[in-house]
Amino acid sequence: MNDSKDSNDKSTWAIGGGVLLGVGVGFFFLQQSPLVFVGCIIAGLGIGLMMTALLSKVR
């Protein structure tokens, strides 16, 4: 039962945090255009993935 990942590794939380940030920002633009809302979610996902990659390289 040896996991290759450390159980205290929280770098993958950056993906969920980025998506939540994108949803929060997207709600401000939801009445203007639903496509901007979706774009904010995708941008948040991309930021979260980049942060995860950077955090995993640090360790």
Image (cartoon, helix red, strand yellow):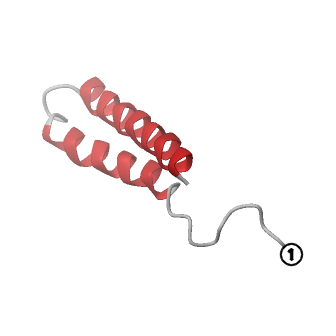
Image height of 12 relative to 6, above or below:
above
Amino acid tagged 1: Met
Residue 25, position as x, y percentages in the image: 20, 42
Residue that protrudes farthest toward the right in the picture: 1
Q: How many numbered circles are shown?
A: 1
Q: In front here: 39 or 57?
A: 57
Element under label 1? loop
Residue 46, position as x, y percentages in the image: 42, 33
Residue 35, position as x, y percentages in the image: 29, 24
Residue at 28 percent across and 48 percent down: it is 21
Residue at 13 percent across and 40 percent down: it is 28
Task: Find residue 36 and report its image quarter.
Answer: top left
Quarter of the image that includes the N terminus:
bottom right
Residue at 23 percent across and 48 percent down: it is 24
Image height of 27 relative to 38, above or below:
below
Quarter of the image that includes the C terminus:
bottom right
Residue at 38 percent across and 37 percent down: it is 47
Q: Few, some or many C-alpha atoms within 10 Å of disc 1 (few <14, some 14-19, many ≥20)?
A: few
Residue that protrudes farthest toward the bottom in the picture: 1
Q: In front here: 37 or 46?
A: 46
Task: Find residue 30 and report its image quarter.
Answer: top left
Q: In this image, 57 relative to 47: left or right? A: right
Image height of 42 relative to 24, above or below:
above
- What residue did someone put label 1 on? 1
Residue that protrudes farthest toward the front in the picture: 58
Q: In this image, 11 relative to 38: left or right? A: right
